[in-house]
Image: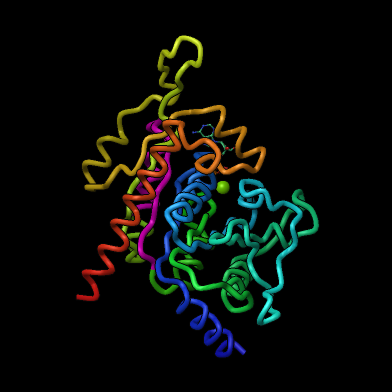
Amino acid sequence: MDEKNDLQIDATLAKIKHRIIVLSGKGGVGKSFIATNLAYGLALQGKKVGLLDVDIHGPSIAKFTNVEGVPIQVHPISGKPAPIKVLSNLWVLTIASMLSSDSSAVIWRGPLKTALIRQFFSDFDWDELDYLVVDCPPGTGDEPLSIIQTLKWVDGAVIVTTPQDMAILDVKKSIDFIQKLNVPILGIVENMKFFRCPHCHKITTIFQGNQLEKMIFEYSLDLLAELEIDPAIATSADQGKPYIYFNNKQPSAKALMEATLKIIEKVERSKESAHK
Ligand SMILES: Nc1ncnc2c1ncn2[C@@H]1O[C@H](COP(=O)(O)OP(=O)(O)O)[C@@H](O)[C@H]1O
Ligand SMILES: [Mg+2]
């Protein structure tokens, strides 16, 4: 049975060109927001993209992409379950689509979580993808470990953090975790860096800290984007209107698109050189 699953997983993985995971040390730092917006950014660049939510206990991708209550689809050709198509070139898969209500708590231990994550590949019919973007729960638990092991290799990880020093120790743990699993770090997204008053335009640093800069230097990391606290981000999430798609003139949307382009450059360049 497991062998049959392995074969099905391999067949799905063969259809996915690039694999990116989004991680953070802490919760509430904007990981699901970034994962959603990177997926939409990649789709806006013409890539075929899958967005997979492996935050089994706190799935929020359905809300961010406005597919709450939409049941999983049936693939028109194979008749197998399929991710939900939200754009002509973007598909979303989340456990939330399989639960009866978005407030139901899922009580699952490690091995069941691993089995579920494997099923996302063995039982679902994905289209050919240029990119799979995976939104993980915070920290270094079963889900990021299982997804990395199931994917077999990952092009890279995007680590999301807020600027305060409290968060940095946890970011270092995330870095240590993915380095042990031989996953390259694509870079850091510094979210909620400051707030710009919409009335007087004065900038206020809400989360103070100077350790992030030091850490970026110490670990030779790339800062992919610095995003401000923008009420439109929170509203867009609540309304299920992906920020980068509906607010493309905003500074944070531009920064997210730049981060997307940097990721494409890094991932596709390193693949090219690997094939030379
Ligand atoms: N830069 C930002 N400005 C305003 N709100 C934000 C920003 N980044 C994230 N949010 C909001 O904060 C909340 C938590 O973000 P989320 O992506 O769910 O965090 P995580 O996945 O890390 O737990 C969401 O409601 C989201 O819309
Ligand atoms: Mg989240």
Judge from the rendering whether residue 32 lies leftward or rightward of residue 258; answer left or right: right
Q: Is residue 59 above or below residue 74?
A: above
Q: How many marks?
A: 0
User: Where is the C terminus found, in terms of image quarters?
Assistant: bottom left
Its colouring scheme is: rainbow
Q: Quadrant of residue 110?
A: bottom right
* Near-viewer residue (45 or 259): 45
* Near-viewer residue (38 or 174): 38
Which residue sits at x=38%, y=56%?
157
Q: Is residue 162 magenta?
A: yes
Residue 4: percent from left, percent from top: 58, 89
Q: Is residue 184 magenta?
A: no
Which residue sits at x=69%, y=76%?
76
Which residue sits at x=48%, y=51%?
139
Residue 221: percent from left, percent from top: 26, 47
Q: Is residue 114 above or below residue 257?
A: below
Q: Residue furthest top?
A: 200
- Give, as a single range, the part of the protein colored magenta: 154-175
Which residue sits at x=51%, y=68%?
146
Judge from the rendering whether residue 171 lies leftward or rightward of residue 117; answer left or right: left
Q: Quadrant of residue 91?
A: bottom right
Residue 240: percent from left, percent from top: 65, 43
Q: Residue furthest right?
A: 100
Residue 211: percent from left, percent from top: 30, 33
User: Where is the N terminus found, in terms of image quarters?
Assistant: bottom right
